[in-house]
Amino acid sequence: MGVPIGDLLPRTKIELEQIDSVAIDAFNAIYQFLSIIRQRDGTPLMDDAGRITSHLSGLFYRTAHIIEAGVRPVYVFDGEPPELKKDTVIKRKVTRERATQEWLQARAEGRVDAFKYAQASARLDEQVLESSKALLRYLGIPVVNASSEGEAQAAYMTSKGDVSFTASQDADALLFGTPRLVRNLTITGRRKLPGKNVYVHISPELFELDDILASLEINREQLIEVSILVGTDYNKGVKGIGPKKALRMVKSFGIQRVLDNLGESLDYERIKQFFLDPDVNHEYDLKWAPVKEEELISFLCDEHDFSRERVENTLQRITGVQHEADQRSLAQWL
């Protein structure tokens, strides 16, 4: 997912406590939870009715963790994918279907690579999306439905100053103009590298658009052009051109001359314009509310078989943080 230009981009470490408010790319985060939170053979967590709950576990406990750090999250959900993304959507569907078949076979044979294929088979259906939104409403967290791409919506909200950061694993939000992007917000901690018996510690990283452009000595339009040459969700990249080569060529010649020299034809202006002026929802409500404890416990424990003790302990920590925040706000008016 996303444009593969991460190696070009300077970044710094950031602590959760330095983040006051953040628009989180919901699809991106939920895919992570569905991929990572699984049993050894790749089977996702399920309730007694056979409904997948991996995403609910990730959303609840990870969101609780960032709330405890004083962060006010907003989750932004994708709307209709743009026509430009049609080929990517079809390709991803085929990949998931193929991975599902590979996973089922690997699991039946007891193979160690079953988990790898299971991760690639993760998909968002209506049950996953609606249950995710229900959980967030019970937590009192704003949910914003984007007109189209969630990252574009989050970038718009951040650039307006309605939130301070955008959170996503993909760099696309920078192309959409977010001034500050945080990676690894929802997956911090010890993680196993794919296909290797090696674990690394993952912590949040901050990408600041102005610093990136200054470091690379380009403007935002040129950053988009570099990405188009490498490949985005809206176009195939030019064969043989990686991020470093694309950067060098755009700075030296500009994308049109690069394409002419290579004999390539690409409607890059349409793609660039989409990044510069995406379809976004201008009508959204960012109101954080107290946790609806009874409804949340019923939803997670009675409906989806979560541990009541663990849920209640987590809620105690969340409500404690909210109470302290309310007391600080009240003190400012005394």
Image (tube, grey):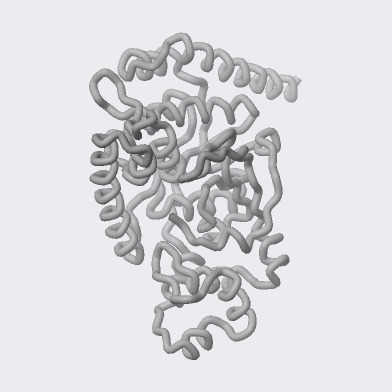
Count of labels shown?
A: 0
The location of residue 262, given as percent across then percent down, is 47, 87
Name the residue at 48% across, 13% down.
310
Q: Is residue 86 above or below residue 302?
A: below
Q: Is residue 133 above or below residue 282?
A: above
Q: Is residue 126 above or below residue 325?
A: below
Q: Quadrant of residue 303?
A: top left
262 lies left or right of 247: left
3 lies left or right of 322: left
The location of residue 143, given as percent across then percent down, is 44, 37
- The N terminus appears in which quarter of the rendering? bottom left
Name the residue at 29% across, 41% down.
103
The location of residue 168, given as percent across then percent down, is 52, 47
Name the residue at 40% across, 42% down.
31
The location of residue 80, given as percent across then percent down, is 32, 53
- Could you say which is closer to the camera, residue 291 or residue 262? 262
Name the residue at 72% across, 65% down.
215
Q: Quadrant of residue 253?
A: bottom right
313 lies left or right of 49: right
The outermost residue toward the top is 309
